[in-house]
Amino acid sequence: MIQWKKITREEEHKFYDYLLILLLLTGGIGLYINGGMVLVPSCLLLTIWTASKLYDHFSGNGFVLQEDRSSVRLFPGEKSSLVFRFRNTSRFPLLNGVISFQTNPIIRSEEDLSHRNPKGNIYRFPLSFLSRGDKQVRVPIIAESRGVTKITDLTYHFPHLTKLTDLSMKYTSPYYKEIIVYPEMKPVYGLEDVYHLRPGKQLSTVSPYEDRLTPTSTREYVPQDPFHRIHWKASAKMNALQSKVYERNVDYSWAILVNIGERTRLGNVHVSALLESLLSHASFLCHTAAEKDYPYELMINGKRPHQRPYLHQREGTGRDHLKKSIELLARVSKDQNLMAFEEMLHRFNLQVSKAKGVLILGEMTEESYRYVSEWVAKGLNVYTLVNEGDYATMKPIKKGMNSYVRTE
């Protein structure tokens, strides 16, 4: 498959036109006056014309960029390198060449290899081949802001050996390498109270539920203990009645619902000006849940062409689940098409199969409270993110007189 396509400029056609005119002119004069010395310039021009045509045709034909489907994953402020592996299989040299490419402004080069333009950052670095061979080039980068970018407009410029112009080749094959910058984490307070009072897998000191399959220790028997709690082997050893002590547990499963939309006074919906802050808080919630091994699912009201027409990650736990979560958050675009938040809540309401803690980030509309009332009636604990100056806290929503309001 051809990777590179040569870019032909009008100046190159003019060069050959002028060269052909000079060749015909000097050749005609030499034949007219029958002078051998006059034909020397014609032979020289013919040599230049032939060499230029051959170099145009064959130069760069063996130039190959090895495919790289890996992804670079960073947090804002972290450093890494973009690695390019080139190969020249042709004997024609490529001297004083320059590779250029473009990315979104979420990253920049640590060295003076990039400059900004309205569309992003343009990078340039030298690359030359005297003959056949392989070369590897590293471009140091630093992550600046959340997002995902690919390498685009990859072009190789190198001077022509016989003309006073440059040749350019544009990379036309798909280049799959991605740079993913995760959102930074902004702390959220009040999470210790976000749980649902039902049997679960997370340990708790205040839960009324016990895991009867995992006794952890024993204590002295008291008359209030039921008969089945007596640990007979321990009682025989201690020569006194001993009661089993079980682990207390509670359900800490979360549903994190993020509204990245914002409604104007006229009722129009657009991407919230607080998008980055919302995603940073959501990232903190995902990290907290993963560290504590809480099951959680993540839903964002960004449209996508899918069976689930919004951004959704099913419930799960662990580090792999977290990686998928923060990558999903990184992929939310500032130009994201939006689904009405109420429609996403409606879909969540249809598929929720068990009581869990519901954490809502973003603007709460009047229509949203209708679903909140249903969830509270079903026994779900619902919380919303409240900004309090420099702090963000999860506050529970409970039933009020006429509507469901945040409790302070």
Image (cartoon, rainbow, N blue to C red):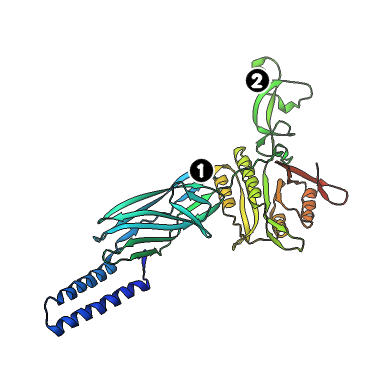
Residue 64 appears left or right of 121: left
Q: Residues within 10 Å of mark 1 (few under 14, many from 20)?
A: few
Q: Nearer the viewer, residue 87 or 13?
A: 13
Q: Quadrant of the C terminus?
A: top right
Q: Which residue is mark 2?
A: 234
In the image, residue 60 sits, relative to residue 108, either above or below, namely: below
> Three-letter amino acid code at disc 1?
Glu
Residue shown at the point (13%, 83%) measured from the top left: 33
Q: Which mark is residue 78?
A: 1
Residue 155 in the image, given as x and y percentages of width and height: 40, 61
**Circles 2 and 1 in contact, beta carbons < 8 Å:** no
Seen as rendered, the residue at the extreme right is: 401
Q: Nearer the viewer, residue 7 or 385?
A: 7
Q: Nearer the viewer, residue 81 or 109?
A: 109
Q: Quadrant of the N terminus?
A: bottom left
Residue 368 in the image, given as x and y percentages of width and height: 76, 55
In the image, residue 309 sits, relative to residue 396, either above or below, namely: below
Q: Nearer the viewer, residue 23 or 377?
A: 23
The quarter holding residue 261 reads bottom right
Q: Earlier in the sequence, mark 2 or mark 1?
A: 1
> Three-letter amino acid code at disc 2?
Ala
**Count of numbered marks:** 2
Residue 48 in the image, given as x and y percentages of width and height: 22, 70
Decide if residue 1 is in sight here. no
Seen as rendered, the residue at the extreme bottom is: 32
Seen as rendered, the residue at the extreme top is: 239
Residue 404 in the image, given as x and y percentages of width and height: 82, 50
Where disc 1 sits, the SS reads: loop
